[in-house]
Amino acid sequence: MEQTIIDKLYEIVSKNRIFTSKADLYAYGFDASIHHAMPSIVVKPKSSKEVEEIVKLANEYSVPIVARGAGTALCGQAVPIYGGILLDMTGMNKIKEIRIEDLYCIVEPGVIYAKLNERLAEHGFFFPPTPGSGDVCTIGGMIAVNASGMRAIKYGATRDYVLGMEIVFPYGKVRFGSRTLKNSSGYQIERLIVGSEGTLGIITEATLRISPLPEKRAVALASFNDVVKAGEGVAAIIAGGMLPSALEIMDKVCIEAVKKAMDIDLPDAEALLLIEVDGKAMEVKEGIKKIAKILEEKADKIEFTDDEERMAELWKGRKGVLPSLSRYGEDMVSVSLADDMSVPISKIPYAIKEFQNIARKYGIIVGTYGHAGDGNLHTKVLINPNDEKNWKKAEQAVDEIYKVVYELGGIASGEHGIGITKAPWINGDIATMEKIKKAIDPKNIMNPGKMMQWKKGIIAYLRYK
Ligand SMILES: Cc1cc2nc3c(=O)[nH]c(=O)nc-3n(C[C@H](O)[C@H](O)[C@H](O)COP(=O)(O)OP(=O)(O)OC[C@H]3O[C@@H](n4cnc5c(N)ncnc54)[C@H](O)[C@@H]3O)c2cc1C
């Protein structure tokens, strides 16, 4: 990077918030995906004014600029593949306003999801999307990827809570949306930014809708001797008119991985469904009863609990699937490939069976789990990443997995986004996306090369040797 740009960055941001050492650049080159690439410089802004000046500078000199929250993205979204400026947004972490009576809060993008919910809980409220990475991921990252999670079936995704936004585009700082719950006042540009993965602008403030915390929660843990039966159970619960607050599936590989890595008490089974019902105490009691009835014939065993400790243990196990998979076998790690496709809910049993067939065909292990209640499945491929042959096999298997997903009427990503790893399977009209990108970012400085711009294979910029 030209020295003039570096000098100008030091004029905008104090020097203790600029990182240039090889060690720092190396560390900032990762997110939670299989990819890695080093930025030329890392800058940690403290205010939207600083962001505005940095983006203006980057635009003037046509330097790539990539925003980074907690770096938990799973598809390479936060990896600066063309170098340039990496903006560490965690320095902008103020909760600016909480307006309970108006049902919104205003936050800076670096606020951590769990921290926001700690503050909201003091008022009996919460920001519901619940990603598995919620203890560390940032609101900016959630908006940029449209994150959601276990409770999306009932509460929706981040998209459903974004009321307004301040964003810095290459041509300057702008505001969209409102503080009101309803808004039919023209283009909803704030919605366009949701899922844009930092390719249009840098979010510097967000106005988010909030919800009252439910009075009570209870959980049912159902075990099955056949994963197809578990999938049928999911469809039966939905068709039975139930709207649980979570409806999660784990296959045998995932159950074994969690038991091995985490010392969590789970039954041995081919598949588990973890179902949560929330609401008023009476509603929860009725809901659990109804679920028991629906699953009576399909499940081998059902455990019910409203004990806070046991529920926390079960959720810890579910959230721990992803890291646990990397401890499943010797020399194997779980790699995020084909990791969060969505299919119509009724197609889940068939999809899981097909994924297992594909894994067998290529002699690899695939763990499947996810938010079955809204059709969002996670498949993690377990391989020894240091053996090149494995990557070839994984790539072919992933391609077949997506063929199945599309045949079933599904999409590439339900919540983790596109980045690099899912770019070949992106949905929607690419030409329109390119036009929007060009109109807002004509010099292509904002997180370039990602999503519809990624034209190569997915086994690229690997973090492994
Ligand atoms: C263990 C684990 C569990 C996970 N579980 C879930 C889950 O249940 N549901 C789910 O949806 N995801 C999940 N994820 C994926 C990931 O955590 C989410 O996508 C999360 O929202 C990313 O937030 P982040 O702060 O880490 O963003 P980063 O990874 O830092 O960035 C993600 C994207 O957002 C952009 N970005 C970040 N901040 C800004 C900003 N201020 N302005 C513009 N663009 C910005 C980046 O450029 C990048 O494109 C999981 C990841 C892990 C590792």
Image (cartoon, rainbow, N blue to C red):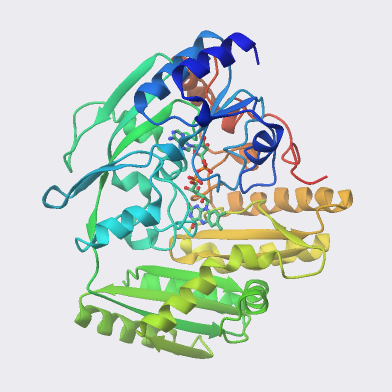
Give the answer, above or below, for where 363 lies relative to 393. Answer: below
- Say which quarter of the image contains residue 52: top left
Residue at 74 percent of width and 60 percent of height: 333
**Residue 90 falls left or right of residue 287:** right
Give residue 257's position: percent from left, percent from top: 67, 73
Where residue 271 appears, x then y in whole percent? 59, 78
Who's the residue at 56% across and 85% down the image? Answer: 265
Residue 62 visible in image: no
Task: Answer left or right for 309 relative to 128.
Answer: right
> Compared with residue 444, is residue 288 higher up or lower down, i.e. above or below?
below
- Which of the pair 80/450 is nearer the observer? 80
> Relative to 374, is 73 above or below?
above
Q: Of residues 343 and 332, which is closer to you in this image?
A: 332
- State the count of labels: 0
Quarter the N terminus occupies: top right
Horizontal side, residue 158 vs residue 414: left or right: left
Note whether 457 is above or below 382 in the view shown: above
Q: 34 left or right of 177?
A: right
How far from the left and from the top, in percent, is residue 275?
A: 42, 75
Q: Quadrant of residue 139?
A: top left
Q: Quadrant of the C terminus?
A: top right
Residue at 78 percent across and 49 percent down: it is 396
* Residue 257, visible in the rendered structure: yes
* Residue at 85%, 52% in the rendered image: 386
